Amino acid sequence: MNVTRQIIIVIKIGIGMLCVVLTGEIDFSVGSAAAMAGVACAAIITQTGSQVMGILAGIGIGIMTGAFNGVMTVYGRIPSFIVTLASMGIFRGIVLVWTQGKPISGLPENFSFWGAEYLLGIIPISTVISIILVIISYLMIHRTKHGVYIKSIGANSEAAILSAIPINRYKIISFLTVGIMCSIGGIITTSKLLSAQPMACEGMEMDVLSAVILGGASLSGGAGTITGTLIGALTIGVINNGMNLLGVSPFFQQIVKGTIILIAVLLKRKEKK
């Protein structure tokens, strides 16, 4: 349960990242997008007192970030790693300017329901949300034609074009999906802390990419599963938890995570050969 609580955000954002990776693209801005959604949610709640409006505002921000990355990649014809690398700085900068580098606090106590409360006193509500999202995304990717289209785009874009698959539309949908997942992750993080931190989810990109790659997804697109991403997230959670229990320095932990990504990619390339 301890590991599960640690990886709930990674699972949510990992679902969206998988959709993008399956199309052969990537998104480095997930941490910044999640932070901006969390700040927007907190700002609206403190100003209006309405949690519904705050949550809708946060999700709206997620949609906007996903749309920006998708449109710039598809219609701007800029590689996604360049677009999202730039938007990572843009979104984080917007958050810092918006908050002046200070957390937004004063949120109502009952807002903690989404991030800190438990169902029947046993299962965290945030974990229940993750399970629902995993089931929905599994059915969409592995049991519908839309999932087949997304995988086909990453596996062979030329064949997808000849098959009359609307590549641009599905790539933008994938970026919108990761944007929405980032907003959900950011809102739950804000709910858990009962404050919106301008530097929330910093470095989240590393954990999310590690989970997706360890789950068997190919960065070139076309290969990857929801169950694999879930297992990858659990693996990252166990590794993080183990290093924390052993008292490993947070700085050294970054080295370990980077090494894991390199090894996973190398093994994947050897499998293809």
Image (spheres, grey):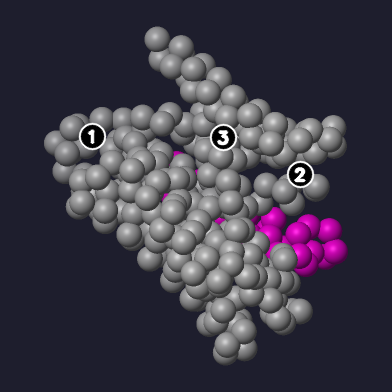
**Nearer the observer, disc 1 or disc 3?**
3
Instruction: Report if residue 177 is visible in the image.
Output: no
Q: Are marks 2 and 3 in contact (CB under 8 Å)?
A: no
Residue located at (82% from left, 65% from top) = 120
Q: Nearer the viewer, residue 103 or 115?
A: 103
> How far, Cα to Cα, is label 1 from label 2?
38 Å
Amino acid under label 3? Ser
**Nearer the observer, disc 1 or disc 2?**
2
Q: Which residue is mark 2?
A: 3
SS at badge 1: helix
N-terminal-most mark, 1 or 3: 1
Residue located at (56% from left, 79% from top) = 43
Residue located at (43% from left, 29% from top) = 218
54 in magenta: no
SS at badge 3: helix
Instruction: Report if residue 6 is visible in the image.
Output: yes
State the image coordinates of residue 257 (x, y, percent, origin top left). 62, 31
N-terminal-most mark, 2 or 3: 2
Residue lying furthest bottom: 48
> How far, Cα to Cα, is label 2 from label 3?
16 Å
Highlighted magenta segment, given as a residue range: 115-143
Number of other residues with Cα within 10 Å of mark 2, as a class: few under 14, some 14 to 19, many 20 or more: some
> How far, Cα to Cα, is label 1 from label 3?
25 Å
Residue lying furthest left: 162
Q: Which residue is mark 1?
A: 157
Q: Nearer the viewer, residue 212 or 205?
A: 205
What number of labels is visible?
Answer: 3
Q: Which residue is mark 3?
A: 210
State the image coordinates of residue 102 (x, y, percent, origin top left). 63, 70
Residue 167 against residue 217 in the figure, above or below = below
Amino acid under label 2? Val
